[in-house]
Each structure stands twice: as structure tokens, then as C-alpha cells.
Image (tube, grey):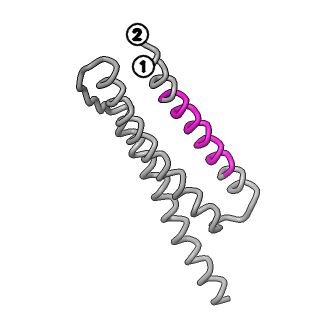
Amino acid sequence: MVDSTTSLIITLIHFLFNYSFMIYLVYLIRKLLRNLIQGPLFTRYQIAGFNLVGQLIIWYIVIDAIGEFVIKMLIESRMEFNISFPDFWLFIALGAFFMFLGRIFQSARTLKEENELTV
């Protein structure tokens, strides 16, 4: 497993990055849900929030996969790039879904503004 101080530091940095990023994502999603429940719908904040959360999820999973590859290469001295369905592709789809929700909210905002102008 971890046999030297350098590999321990690399592993700890990787885990700290993962968990701090996940906490930040949960914080953003929670803020976005509060805004959806309490405020009016189809605001610019909600559109930007959905897009940001989707992009951050995709960036997170890509950086995590690269980090795991580098850790295996440095610590275990083997090159293995493992992309499995539950881990990688599910999070990519989740990030794309949030970005798609941002597009839907953008279209709904445009339609709402046009409808308010006609009345």
C-alpha cells in the first residue's frame, strides 16, 4: 500500500481534493435548491447555477480519473486506466443533465419574458 512519506502525502492531497470538491458541490446544489424553492423560477442565478454544477461535476470526475491514474503510476508503479460505468460515465451523464437543465431554464426564461411582453 503506501510505503513512503511522499506517497502518503500524494494520497492525502488527492483525498483532500476529492472530499473538499464534493463538499463544495453539495453546497452549490443546496444553495440552488433553496433558490428554486423560495424564489421565482427561471432566474439567471438558477441558469448559471445549473450550468456551473454540471461543469464542475464533469471537471471533477475527469480530474479524479487523471489523479487516480497518476497515483497508481507513481505509487504502485503500474499504468492502469480504469473507467467503469458506475464511477466515470454516470457522473459525466449527471453533469450533462445539470447543464441540460440550465439550457431548459434558459429557454423557459426567454419564453417567460416574451409572454410578459405580450400581455
The magenta stretch spans residue 104: no
Q: Name the residue at 46% across, 15% down.
A: 5
Q: Name the residue at 38% across, 42% down.
A: 62
Residue 86 position within the rendered picture, expressed as x and y whole percent measured from the top left: 37, 31
Q: Name the residue at 50% across, 64% down.
A: 104
Residue 96 position within the rendered picture, expressed as x and y whole percent measured from the top left: 42, 52
Where residue 84 sits, quadrant-wise, is top left
Q: Quarter of the image for the N terminus: give it.
A: top left
Q: Is residue 119 left or right of residue 109?
A: right
Identified by mark 2, the residue type is Asp
Q: Which residues are magenta?
A: 14-31
Callout 1: helix, strand or loop? helix
The magenta stretch spans residue 27: yes
Front-most of 31 and 21? 21
Find disc 1 in the rendering and name its residue.
7
Find disc 2 in the rendering and name its residue.
3
Where residue 35 sits, quadrant-wise, is bottom right
Where residue 27 sits, quadrant-wise, is top right
